[in-house]
Amino acid sequence: MSKWDRDYLDLCRRILSEGVEVENRTGINTVKVPSAHFHFDLSEEFPILTTKQLFIRQAVLEMLWIYQAQSNDVRWLQERDVKIWNEWEIDENGIWTADQMLLNNKTGKLEKTTVHKDFGKEFAHTIGTAYGYIVNKFQMTQNLINTIKTNPKDRRMVMTLWQNDYLDTAVLPSCVWSSEWDVTDGKLNCWVHQRSCDVPLGLPFNVTQYATLLCMLAQVTGLKPGTIDWSIKDAHIYVNQIDGIKEQIRRQDEQGDLPAPELWLNPEIDDFFEFDNSRDCKDVKLINYKHLGKIAFPIAQ
Protein backbone atom coordinates (compact mmCIF):
# COMPACT_ATOMS: atom_id res chain seq x y z
CA MET A 1 0.00 0.00 0.00
CA SER A 2 1.03 3.64 -0.34
CA LYS A 3 3.48 4.67 2.40
CA TRP A 4 3.25 8.27 1.16
CA ASP A 5 -0.52 8.37 1.74
CA ARG A 6 -0.07 7.08 5.26
CA ASP A 7 2.73 9.50 6.14
CA TYR A 8 0.91 12.42 4.51
CA LEU A 9 -2.38 11.81 6.29
CA ASP A 10 -0.56 11.30 9.58
CA LEU A 11 0.74 14.86 9.18
CA CYS A 12 -2.78 16.08 8.37
CA ARG A 13 -4.14 14.41 11.50
CA ARG A 14 -1.33 15.93 13.55
CA ILE A 15 -2.09 19.42 12.25
CA LEU A 16 -5.80 19.06 13.00
CA SER A 17 -5.21 17.68 16.51
CA GLU A 18 -2.13 19.62 17.64
CA GLY A 19 -2.00 22.65 15.36
CA VAL A 20 -2.43 26.29 16.35
CA GLU A 21 -4.73 28.62 14.40
CA VAL A 22 -2.93 31.76 13.21
CA GLU A 23 -3.59 34.80 11.03
CA ASN A 24 -1.56 35.45 7.90
CA ARG A 25 -1.28 37.83 4.95
CA THR A 26 -3.99 36.04 2.89
CA GLY A 27 -6.81 36.84 5.34
CA ILE A 28 -7.67 33.15 5.62
CA ASN A 29 -6.41 31.68 8.88
CA THR A 30 -4.30 28.54 8.92
CA VAL A 31 -3.93 25.74 11.43
CA LYS A 32 -0.19 25.06 11.64
CA VAL A 33 2.55 23.03 13.22
CA PRO A 34 6.07 24.49 13.24
CA SER A 35 7.86 21.69 11.40
CA ALA A 36 7.60 18.32 9.70
CA HIS A 37 9.87 15.83 7.97
CA PHE A 38 9.41 13.01 5.45
CA HIS A 39 11.75 10.36 4.08
CA PHE A 40 11.21 8.69 0.69
CA ASP A 41 13.06 5.78 -0.87
CA LEU A 42 12.36 5.99 -4.59
CA SER A 43 13.72 2.50 -5.14
CA GLU A 44 10.75 1.23 -3.12
CA GLU A 45 7.91 3.60 -4.03
CA PHE A 46 7.15 6.55 -6.29
CA PRO A 47 5.35 9.08 -4.07
CA ILE A 48 2.02 10.22 -5.45
CA LEU A 49 -1.17 10.27 -3.40
CA THR A 50 -3.87 7.68 -4.00
CA THR A 51 -6.44 8.92 -1.48
CA LYS A 52 -7.05 11.81 -3.88
CA GLN A 53 -6.22 12.26 -7.53
CA LEU A 54 -3.06 14.16 -8.39
CA PHE A 55 -2.62 15.38 -11.96
CA ILE A 56 0.87 14.24 -12.94
CA ARG A 57 0.90 16.17 -16.23
CA GLN A 58 0.38 19.53 -14.54
CA ALA A 59 2.83 18.71 -11.77
CA VAL A 60 5.61 17.68 -14.13
CA LEU A 61 5.08 20.62 -16.48
CA GLU A 62 5.35 23.11 -13.61
CA MET A 63 8.60 21.44 -12.55
CA LEU A 64 9.93 21.57 -16.12
CA TRP A 65 8.88 25.23 -16.36
CA ILE A 66 11.22 25.96 -13.46
CA TYR A 67 14.18 23.64 -14.00
CA GLN A 68 14.16 22.90 -17.74
CA ALA A 69 12.57 25.89 -19.50
CA GLN A 70 13.87 28.02 -16.60
CA SER A 71 11.02 30.46 -17.18
CA ASN A 72 9.05 32.87 -15.04
CA ASP A 73 6.52 33.56 -17.83
CA VAL A 74 3.07 32.32 -16.80
CA ARG A 75 1.99 32.15 -20.45
CA TRP A 76 4.34 29.17 -20.94
CA LEU A 77 2.14 27.25 -18.51
CA GLN A 78 -1.13 28.62 -19.84
CA GLU A 79 -0.23 27.49 -23.36
CA ARG A 80 0.02 23.97 -21.91
CA ASP A 81 -3.29 24.21 -20.03
CA VAL A 82 -1.65 24.61 -16.62
CA LYS A 83 -3.35 27.34 -14.60
CA ILE A 84 -1.79 27.03 -11.16
CA TRP A 85 0.15 30.34 -11.37
CA ASN A 86 -2.65 32.46 -12.87
CA GLU A 87 -3.42 34.25 -9.59
CA TRP A 88 0.17 35.49 -9.31
CA GLU A 89 0.58 36.69 -12.90
CA ILE A 90 1.72 40.32 -13.29
CA ASP A 91 -0.59 42.12 -15.75
CA GLU A 92 0.33 43.57 -19.13
CA ASN A 93 1.19 46.93 -17.54
CA GLY A 94 3.62 45.38 -15.08
CA ILE A 95 1.20 45.70 -12.14
CA TRP A 96 0.33 42.93 -9.70
CA THR A 97 -2.79 43.37 -7.58
CA ALA A 98 -3.94 41.32 -4.61
CA ASP A 99 -5.97 41.66 -1.43
CA GLN A 100 -3.74 40.97 1.55
CA MET A 101 -3.83 41.36 5.30
CA LEU A 102 -1.33 44.02 6.39
CA LEU A 103 -0.47 45.34 9.83
CA ASN A 104 -2.06 48.71 10.68
CA ASN A 105 0.60 50.48 12.72
CA LYS A 106 -2.02 52.62 14.47
CA THR A 107 -4.30 49.79 15.61
CA GLY A 108 -1.72 47.01 15.75
CA LYS A 109 -4.15 44.74 13.90
CA LEU A 110 -4.10 43.03 10.53
CA GLU A 111 -6.46 44.71 8.08
CA LYS A 112 -7.51 43.74 4.57
CA THR A 113 -5.74 45.98 2.06
CA THR A 114 -5.64 45.96 -1.74
CA VAL A 115 -1.99 45.90 -2.75
CA HIS A 116 -0.81 47.24 -6.11
CA LYS A 117 2.84 46.55 -6.88
CA ASP A 118 4.55 47.95 -9.97
CA PHE A 119 7.15 45.52 -11.30
CA GLY A 120 7.63 47.35 -14.61
CA LYS A 121 6.38 46.29 -18.02
CA GLU A 122 9.44 44.12 -18.58
CA PHE A 123 7.93 41.69 -16.09
CA ALA A 124 4.45 41.62 -17.67
CA HIS A 125 2.86 38.13 -17.60
CA THR A 126 5.55 36.76 -15.28
CA ILE A 127 5.89 36.13 -11.55
CA GLY A 128 8.88 38.45 -11.33
CA THR A 129 12.32 37.33 -10.22
CA ALA A 130 11.30 34.00 -8.73
CA TYR A 131 11.67 30.28 -9.44
CA GLY A 132 12.70 29.82 -13.09
CA TYR A 133 14.16 33.30 -13.26
CA ILE A 134 16.64 32.42 -10.51
CA VAL A 135 17.40 28.98 -11.97
CA ASN A 136 18.17 30.54 -15.34
CA LYS A 137 20.22 33.46 -13.98
CA PHE A 138 22.58 31.13 -12.13
CA GLN A 139 22.31 28.18 -14.58
CA MET A 140 21.48 25.96 -11.62
CA THR A 141 20.25 22.89 -13.48
CA GLN A 142 23.18 22.86 -15.90
CA ASN A 143 25.69 23.28 -13.08
CA LEU A 144 24.10 20.53 -11.00
CA ILE A 145 24.08 18.03 -13.88
CA ASN A 146 27.68 18.87 -14.76
CA THR A 147 28.81 18.37 -11.16
CA ILE A 148 26.97 15.07 -10.79
CA LYS A 149 28.71 13.81 -13.94
CA THR A 150 32.21 15.18 -13.34
CA ASN A 151 32.56 15.35 -9.55
CA PRO A 152 29.93 13.09 -7.95
CA LYS A 153 31.68 13.21 -4.55
CA ASP A 154 31.19 16.98 -4.33
CA ARG A 155 29.43 18.05 -1.11
CA ARG A 156 28.41 21.44 -2.50
CA MET A 157 25.67 20.37 -4.88
CA VAL A 158 23.04 22.88 -3.80
CA MET A 159 20.32 24.68 -5.73
CA THR A 160 18.84 27.57 -3.76
CA LEU A 161 15.97 29.61 -5.13
CA TRP A 162 16.11 31.97 -2.12
CA GLN A 163 18.28 34.86 -3.31
CA ASN A 164 18.01 37.96 -1.11
CA ASP A 165 18.82 40.37 -3.93
CA TYR A 166 15.74 39.23 -5.87
CA LEU A 167 13.08 38.89 -3.16
CA ASP A 168 11.60 42.38 -3.55
CA THR A 169 11.00 41.84 -7.26
CA ALA A 170 9.39 38.40 -6.83
CA VAL A 171 5.60 38.12 -6.63
CA LEU A 172 5.91 35.10 -4.33
CA PRO A 173 9.33 34.14 -2.95
CA SER A 174 9.95 30.44 -3.37
CA CYS A 175 8.19 28.17 -0.88
CA VAL A 176 10.25 25.12 -1.82
CA TRP A 177 13.45 27.10 -1.75
CA SER A 178 16.43 24.75 -1.60
CA SER A 179 17.61 21.30 -2.59
CA GLU A 180 20.88 19.55 -1.73
CA TRP A 181 22.11 16.62 -3.80
CA ASP A 182 24.58 13.78 -3.38
CA VAL A 183 25.66 10.58 -5.05
CA THR A 184 26.11 7.56 -2.79
CA ASP A 185 26.69 3.98 -3.93
CA GLY A 186 25.53 4.72 -7.47
CA LYS A 187 22.32 6.41 -6.35
CA LEU A 188 21.26 10.05 -6.62
CA ASN A 189 19.76 11.47 -3.42
CA CYS A 190 18.48 14.87 -2.38
CA TRP A 191 17.24 16.85 0.61
CA VAL A 192 14.51 19.41 -0.07
CA HIS A 193 13.70 22.38 2.16
CA GLN A 194 10.30 24.09 2.22
CA ARG A 195 9.85 27.32 4.21
CA SER A 196 6.04 27.40 4.02
CA CYS A 197 3.80 24.49 3.14
CA ASP A 198 0.17 24.50 2.03
CA VAL A 199 -0.32 20.86 2.97
CA PRO A 200 -3.57 20.12 1.05
CA LEU A 201 -2.57 21.81 -2.22
CA GLY A 202 1.15 22.42 -2.42
CA LEU A 203 2.77 19.48 -0.67
CA PRO A 204 1.35 16.63 -2.81
CA PHE A 205 2.35 18.49 -5.99
CA ASN A 206 5.80 19.41 -4.73
CA VAL A 207 6.76 15.94 -3.51
CA THR A 208 5.75 14.30 -6.79
CA GLN A 209 7.56 17.00 -8.76
CA TYR A 210 10.88 16.59 -6.98
CA ALA A 211 10.61 12.81 -7.10
CA THR A 212 10.18 13.08 -10.87
CA LEU A 213 13.04 15.56 -11.13
CA LEU A 214 15.34 13.22 -9.21
CA CYS A 215 14.38 10.28 -11.42
CA MET A 216 15.02 12.34 -14.55
CA LEU A 217 18.41 13.57 -13.33
CA ALA A 218 19.39 10.07 -12.27
CA GLN A 219 18.53 8.72 -15.72
CA VAL A 220 20.54 11.32 -17.64
CA THR A 221 23.57 10.95 -15.36
CA GLY A 222 23.68 7.16 -15.39
CA LEU A 223 22.59 6.74 -11.77
CA LYS A 224 19.73 5.04 -9.95
CA PRO A 225 17.07 6.97 -8.00
CA GLY A 226 17.85 7.01 -4.30
CA THR A 227 16.23 8.85 -1.42
CA ILE A 228 14.57 12.19 -0.77
CA ASP A 229 14.42 13.78 2.65
CA TRP A 230 11.88 16.57 2.92
CA SER A 231 11.96 19.22 5.65
CA ILE A 232 9.12 21.67 6.22
CA LYS A 233 8.97 24.85 8.26
CA ASP A 234 5.37 25.93 8.95
CA ALA A 235 3.20 23.08 7.73
CA HIS A 236 -0.35 24.39 7.56
CA ILE A 237 -3.91 23.77 6.46
CA TYR A 238 -6.11 26.76 5.64
CA VAL A 239 -9.33 26.74 7.62
CA ASN A 240 -11.36 26.60 4.40
CA GLN A 241 -9.50 23.39 3.44
CA ILE A 242 -10.28 21.46 6.62
CA ASP A 243 -13.46 19.79 5.32
CA GLY A 244 -11.58 18.51 2.27
CA ILE A 245 -8.79 17.07 4.41
CA LYS A 246 -11.33 15.40 6.69
CA GLU A 247 -12.91 13.83 3.60
CA GLN A 248 -9.51 12.53 2.49
CA ILE A 249 -8.89 11.07 5.96
CA ARG A 250 -12.34 9.42 5.88
CA ARG A 251 -11.49 7.85 2.55
CA GLN A 252 -8.42 6.23 4.00
CA ASP A 253 -10.25 5.10 7.14
CA GLU A 254 -13.14 3.59 5.16
CA GLN A 255 -11.54 2.46 1.90
CA GLY A 256 -7.80 2.39 2.60
CA ASP A 257 -5.04 3.79 0.47
CA LEU A 258 -4.18 2.05 -2.78
CA PRO A 259 -0.93 0.60 -4.13
CA ALA A 260 1.53 3.22 -5.34
CA PRO A 261 1.98 3.39 -9.12
CA GLU A 262 5.24 3.20 -11.07
CA LEU A 263 6.81 6.17 -12.83
CA TRP A 264 7.77 5.58 -16.46
CA LEU A 265 10.30 7.84 -18.13
CA ASN A 266 11.19 7.54 -21.80
CA PRO A 267 14.39 5.44 -21.58
CA GLU A 268 15.74 6.96 -24.80
CA ILE A 269 16.19 10.38 -23.19
CA ASP A 270 19.76 10.99 -22.01
CA ASP A 271 19.62 14.80 -21.85
CA PHE A 272 17.41 16.44 -19.23
CA PHE A 273 16.63 19.29 -21.63
CA GLU A 274 15.23 16.82 -24.15
CA PHE A 275 12.38 15.54 -21.99
CA ASP A 276 9.17 16.54 -23.76
CA ASN A 277 7.67 19.71 -22.28
CA SER A 278 4.76 20.01 -24.68
CA ARG A 279 1.19 19.97 -23.41
CA ASP A 280 1.16 16.16 -23.70
CA CYS A 281 4.33 15.63 -21.63
CA LYS A 282 4.96 12.48 -23.68
CA ASP A 283 8.07 11.23 -21.90
CA VAL A 284 6.43 10.81 -18.48
CA LYS A 285 3.69 8.33 -17.58
CA LEU A 286 2.26 6.66 -14.52
CA ILE A 287 1.75 2.90 -14.69
CA ASN A 288 -1.21 1.48 -12.72
CA TYR A 289 -2.16 4.74 -11.03
CA LYS A 290 -5.35 4.11 -9.08
CA HIS A 291 -6.86 6.77 -6.85
CA LEU A 292 -10.02 7.60 -4.92
CA GLY A 293 -11.00 10.65 -7.00
CA LYS A 294 -10.69 14.39 -6.91
CA ILE A 295 -10.94 16.68 -3.90
CA ALA A 296 -11.17 20.40 -4.66
CA PHE A 297 -9.22 22.69 -2.33
CA PRO A 298 -9.40 26.51 -2.52
CA ILE A 299 -6.25 28.56 -3.17
CA ALA A 300 -5.23 31.29 -0.72
CA GLN A 301 -3.37 34.08 -2.49
Image (cartoon, rainbow, N blue to C red):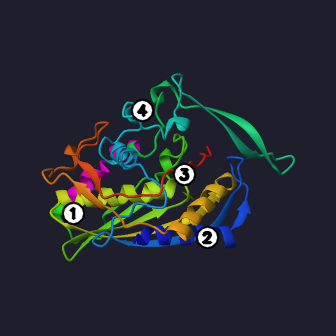
**Is there any visible trace of residue 167 in the rendered image?**
yes
Dividing the picture into quarters, in which one does residue 157 lie? bottom left
Element carrying mark 4: helix
Circles 4 and 1 in contact, beta carbons < 8 Å: no
Mark carried by residue 78: 4
* Label 1 Cα neighbours within 10 Å, binned few <14 / some 14-19 / many ≥20: many
Question: How far separated are the C-alphas under marks 4 and 2?
Answer: 35 Å
Question: How far separated are the C-alphas under marks 1 and 2?
Answer: 38 Å
Tell me the quadrant of the picture where the N terminus can be found: bottom left
Residue identified by numbered label 3: 295
Question: How far separated are the C-alphas under marks 4 and 1?
Answer: 32 Å
Element carrying mark 3: loop
Circles 4 and 3 in contact, beta carbons < 8 Å: no
Question: How far separated are the C-alphas under marks 4 and 3?
Answer: 22 Å
Circles 2 and 3 in contact, beta carbons < 8 Å: no
Q: Earlier in the sequence, mark 3 or mark 1?
A: 1
Please tell me whether mark 2 or mark 3 is closer to you in this view: 3
Residue identified by numbered label 2: 13
Please tell me whether mark 1 or mark 2 is closer to you in this view: 2
Question: How far separated are the C-alphas under marks 2 and 3?
Answer: 17 Å
